[in-house]
Amino acid sequence: MTIANQVTVGRILLVPFFVIQVLYYERTGDEWHRLAALLTFALATLTDALDGYLARRYHQYTELGALLDPVADKILLVSALVLLTFDKGTHLPNLPLWLAGTVIGRDAVQAIGLAVTHYTVGKVPIRPRLVGKAATLLLMVTVIWALLKWDAGWLRWLAISAAVCTGISGVLYVLDGMKLLSASPDSAPKAESSPKTPNS
């Protein structure tokens, strides 16, 4: 458990507090709940950059960190999207349903694909792509923009940009998985054994 991984775990532990503050703000409208949610989400966003810096600076790249970091991002972002999209009150702006659908759909396909690939191939190399990092950054900016209740026009364009990058990253992950599966001997068709002829 390196320092970078501890920071990542800390980001995961911030999620319940963030969720509670958003729910209380939607119920009561007390601005300090919105401020607490905003600061918590911003802190979690900063830790996303911090754990990467620590891993590079102190050469603390680990397989656990490669798994935990995207999981922490997904837990944080999916929680925020669900809160700001589905069955919410009127105090915060609504994020479009198609944005949440794109993100949750991409994550579901990615999780299923990872499980299938791991079962078929074994150890699966996790390669973060630039477009995936861009999608994560745009989603974080979109959520912060919504929590700040800034201009709705810009919020829509941020959501569109985030959805496009998310969709592209999902397609690339699927293509990577297909390449791994096609290269595996287990995915090749098994030759049928020739029937035995009875002895004369």
Image (tube, rainbow, N blue to C red):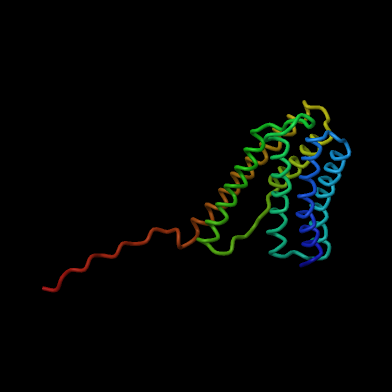
Q: In this orientation, which residue lies closer to the viewer: 5 or 29? A: 29
Identify which residue is drawn at 68% across, 40% down.
165
Query: Residue 96: percent from the left, percent from the top?
Result: 68, 31
Q: To which quarter of the image does residue 2 belong?
A: bottom right
Q: Does residue 182 sit above or below 144 in this rendering?
A: below
Q: Does residue 16 sit above or below 152 in this rendering?
A: below
Q: To which quarter of the image does residue 9 belong?
A: bottom right
Farthest left residue in view: 200
Q: Is residue 193 left or right of residue 25?
A: left
Give the total number of marks visible in the rendering.
0
Identify which residue is drawn at 83% across, 55% down.
50
Q: To which quarter of the image does residue 193 belong?
A: bottom left
Farthest top residue in view: 153
Query: Residue 119: percent from the left, percent from the top?
Result: 52, 61
Q: In this orientation, which residue lies closer to the viewer: 34 or 57? A: 34
Query: Residue 74: percent from the left, percent from the top?
Result: 69, 49
Query: Residue 196: percent from the left, percent from the top?
Result: 21, 68
- What quarter of the picture does the C terminus occupy? bottom left
Identify which residue is drawn at 82% across, 53% down.
47
Farthest front residue in view: 28
Q: Does residue 54 sit above or below 158 in this rendering?
A: below
Q: Is residue 110 left or right of residue 69?
A: left
Q: Does residue 160 sit above or below 196 in this rendering?
A: above
Q: In this orientation, which residue lies closer to the viewer: 111 or 35? A: 35
- What quarter of the picture does the N terminus occupy? bottom right
